[in-house]
Image: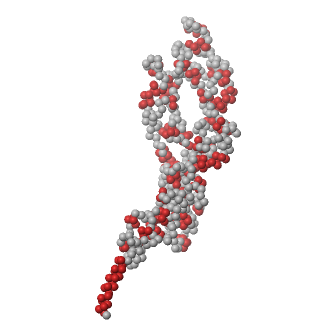
Amino acid sequence: MRKLSLILLPVLVLSLVSLRFTSPSPHGKDFRYSCELCHNPNGWEVDTRDIRFDHAVTGFALDGVHRETDCRMCHSSLVFGDAGTECADCHTDVHENTLGASCERCHTPRSWIVSDITLMHQQGRLPLVGPHSTADCYDCHKSASLLRFEPIGVTCYECHVNDYLSASEPNHVQGNFSTDCEECHLTNAFSWSGAGFNHTFFPLTKGHAVSDCFACHTQGSPYSSISPDCWSCHAGDYNAATNPNHATSGFPVQCNDCHTTDPGWKPASFALHDNLFFPIYSGEHEGEWESCGDCHENPSDYSSFTCISCHEHNKQDMDDEHDDVGGYIYESRACLECHPTGSGELGFNHNTSAFPLTGAHITTACVDCHANGYDNTPTGCNDCHNPDYQQAQNPSHLVLALSVNCLDCHTTLPGWSPASFAQHNQLYPLLGAHALLSNDCFGCHKGDYVNTPNTCYGCHEGDYTQATNPNHQSAQFPTDCEVCHTQNAWQPSTFNHDGQYFPIYSGKHDGEWDECSDCHTSPGNYAIFSCIDCHEHNQQDMDDEHQGVSGYVYNSIACLNCHPDGSEQSGTRRFTPKRVR
């Protein structure tokens, strides 16, 4: 019997060893990794702190919250190959397939919180500017669960049709107004009227800077019926003018020939007088008169004038001086016919030609323009001033391909200034507070029109670095000013804390704090925050309340990971993986 036992014992051992190596692996027939990467000789129980298996070799590296997740949460069976690698394999699509299957477009393995919804929108069909940047997502994306984000239209009218239909001053429907809201309203304005109305087609400046629309637009009449022509509004002012009498004097009805938009119609300058009638702002008569009445002695008829009531023009002297001039008579109209420029010498009256002389042209020597004689002299700006155009460097007219018609920007005043640049909005739109600087070129360009920055921070770095409430530098705020500010003014400003980080203006924490430092306990470093220094968050109560919660630790990062929106149920309601089967 003892010999038989000695014979059977090796056979039994070999049978057990054979069974060990021939029995199927609980991890599936294709599992090829070494057991000791996860197990140790003390038993099959896996100690997660001592696993040497590199999950990255599977093509799915564990990052963020995945690193802290229990293996069985994803591997519901011991056959590891059965686990999927797509987000939807483990996580319920709370958006109900309205945003597609690419969760990583918005979320990261570190948190479900979307870091910058506004930035995401900037990359989509509807960049968020002005009031849209502060609007609640659910104002536009309606859903019962507040989690569905169906694609919506991107035209103003699609969202604001009720605003259009209910508008009464003016009535948009009766007035047959365009449904393209941007034709009149600014997308970065927080009001439909006032500063929110795009009146750039007829700038409301100086005397036109009225706050009452009905001062120009007759109440009850279509707003589109009004004309931008001066005469359409100011015919009464024209007809009532007596000093001088505009109607009897046949003055042009284009008010801006003489007036600016300054209130009270003053100061006024009849610059056309030199070109249309007689040079009084240039030539011999410049500075020789004080009021229109010096020459126009009949205030009710400016078509009559006198040349013989001033200076040395007494009849005897003039008769003696003109004793050899045929046809001479001592009469004002005769004076004008022979001396159309007021000069003592007879000459060509350029002002009655096809090229009246104004501005710097008045004092230009004849030979400067008529170098090749007086016949067929060109009259286009570029015909004479092409060298000025080619050599202009600040800005370079050639590089910017500016118009060669100098009058598009310049007048005939000396020095090429002042100049206007109507194309500015094509390069950089002047909106909000920037529009107030449109006449102060030096304020932004500092004399250098080539290297002027066109980013907020490029001009406002000083405002950023000097900001103290809060300190933008120490808090490492973004240098893209438009994230919080609009172009209208620095204040009011908005900081999308709810959308980018954590809801403090809504939800459980709305009204539960006074200062940023209530949560950000390290001055100057807003990346540090605390959840456990307020409310009922003492460690003993929290430890008791979280008994049985896997991975629970008493620190602020863990609080945020489990309660990303500050509510007690947020972790289980919105971020629970699929149940293990």
Q: Is residue 387 above or below residue 23?
A: above
How far across and how far down the image is residue 199, in percent? 60, 39
Q: Is residue 103 left or right of residue 221?
A: left
Q: Is residue 554 above or below residue 393?
A: below
Q: Is residue 520 left or right of residue 4?
A: right
- Point out the residue furthest to the right here: 220
Regarding residue 424, the answer to whether it shows in the image is: yes
The one nearer the camera, 105 or 116, is: 105
How far across and how far down the image is residue 194, in percent? 62, 43
Residue at x-position 42% and y-position 28%: 387
Write down the quadrant of residue 96 in the picture.
bottom right
The one nearer the camera, 383 or 577, is: 577
Q: Quadrant of the N terminus?
A: bottom left
How far across and how far down the image is residue 358, in percent? 53, 24
**How many numbered marks does the figure carry?**
0
Write down the quadrant of residue 372 in the picture.
top left
Residue at x-position 32% and y-position 88%: 8
How far across and how far down the image is residue 436, in percent? 56, 40
The one nearer the camera, 205 or 500, is: 500
Colour scheme employed for the rendering of this structure: secondary structure
Regarding residue 490, the answer to whether it shows in the image is: no
Residue at x-position 40% and y-position 77%: 44
The one nearer the camera, 153 or 412, is: 153
Q: Is residue 171 above or below residue 370?
A: below
Q: Is residue 199 above or below residue 524?
A: above
